[in-house]
Image: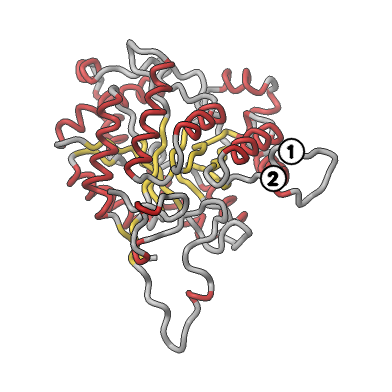
Amino acid sequence: MLHVPERGIPRRRRLPERCRTNPPGRSGKSPVGAAARKKSGPWRVAARVIDVPLSVLDLAPVAAGTTVGAALRHTTELARRTEELGYHRFWVAEHHNMPAIASSAPAVLIAHVAAATSTIRVGSGGVMLPNHAPLVVAEQFGTLEALHPGRIDLGIGRAPGTDQPTALALRRTMAGLSAENFPEELDDLVNYFTGERPGPITATPGLGDRPAIWLLGSSGFSARLAGLLGLPFSFAHHFSAANTLPALALYRQSFRPSRWLDRPYAMVAVNAVCAEDDERAAWLSGPASLSFLRLRTGRPAPLASPEEAAAYPYTEAERQFVLERRAGQALGSPETVRGQLAELLARTEADELMLTTMVYDIADRVRSYELIAEKVAGGLRRQD
């Protein structure tokens, strides 16, 4: 089973004190305070070895031959099961005009998932702030926090989550298509929750009902901004693996202690498919590879079956594209996935891992998370 952080977990499932950790939740403070890290004479306090929390990023994949309604029900089913397994967070994405993804309205889906669960943290991975007025986001997530206090995460991104024509349809103006105003929009959003700059507009709900705020990114821009603001940072290794290490280094170098954190806290999102053996996992991962290829080449479609993906006539260039994308994934049997995730942890020194699993059948999706919780998680540890 997974290591389960103490917050919000029934007493019968709490772990011994030496095994607990406290990822950013409402307070956002890291488990070891500044005093514990100061020198005592010529020696530093010995580092603890702790279990690494695992979380879930779900896109509500729409399988070919099924409905959007089924996809959303499957996301809710997965949230319930991963809560039982001890995963720490369950985030949903924001994507638009993508036939294979039903997660286009994260605030609405978060409300549903949070109501269907009781202890797991639920949040956005993320809300693409340039698509929304900061006041609206503050009111929506203030409402969610008021309804589910201490369980809501607000992950913020600056990408559109779609193509340019769809972004224009969302924002209704060409002026809004640039991300240049993102820092100012983020500052406005935070202020609606904190009220540090009083003004004529109050977010109700929002002011006094603040979710845990995260910054998401796939490049150095958001990494540096998260560090300067002292926010926890989630990096999109699952589609920007080449930028992972530089971005995390920049985040840590730029970090300034804040009301949110006294030291950096980095989460890395990774594609993961775990099955009974490597061959089965490779078979199950085929539809996601084909879906990503179709999206990149302007041919989006619902998520294909493994049979359709296996029969697809890849060109040599397309095959190379798929192989390069798979190189950054955790894919295989429990033993294989354990090694891949452990190696990722060693390279990134991540405080938390977020797994995203896009396979055709919900039973295979659930089983992947079960295998990781039961046979992989216990071997993922880091020094604190």
| Residue drawn at x 41%, y 54% as measured from the top left | 5
| Between 258 and 256, the one nearer to me in the picture | 258
Whether 245 is drawn above or below 97: the answer is below
Q: What distance separates the C-alpha of mark 1 from that of mark 2? A: 7 Å
Q: Looking at the rendering, which quadrant does residue 259 occupy? A: bottom right
Whether 356 is drawn above or below 291: the answer is below
Determine if residue 317 is in view.
Answer: no
**Residue named by callout 2:** 193
Tell me: 4 left or right of 233: left
| Residue drawn at x 82%, y 48% as measured from the top left | 198
**Could you tell me the amino acid type at mark 2?**
Phe
Q: Position of residue 338 (x, y in %)?
A: 23, 48
The local secondary structure at tag 1 comes to: loop
Q: Earlier in the sequence, mark 1 or mark 2?
A: 2
Whether 49 is drawn above or below 198: the answer is below
Q: Looking at the rendering, which quadrant does residue 327 occupy? A: top left
Q: Position of residue 156 (x, y in %)?
A: 57, 40
Q: Looking at the rendering, which quadrant does residue 44 occupy? A: bottom left
Mark 1: few, some, or many residues within 10 Å (few <14, many ≥20)?
Answer: many
- Hey, which residue is sitting farthest bottom in the picture? 41
Mark 2 and mark 1 in contact (Cβ < 8 Å)? yes
Determine if residue 215 is in view.
Answer: yes
Mark 2: few, some, or many residues within 10 Å (few <14, many ≥20)?
Answer: many
| Between 312 and 125, the one nearer to me in the picture | 125
- Hey, which residue is sitting farthest front in the picture? 12
Q: Position of residue 147 (x, y in %)?
A: 59, 37
| Residue drawn at x 41%, y 50% as measured from the top left | 10
Give the quarter of the figure containing the C terminus. Answer: bottom left
| Residue drawn at x 37%, y 44% as measured from the top left | 87
**Residue named by callout 1:** 203
**Could you tell me the amino acid type at mark 1?**
Ala
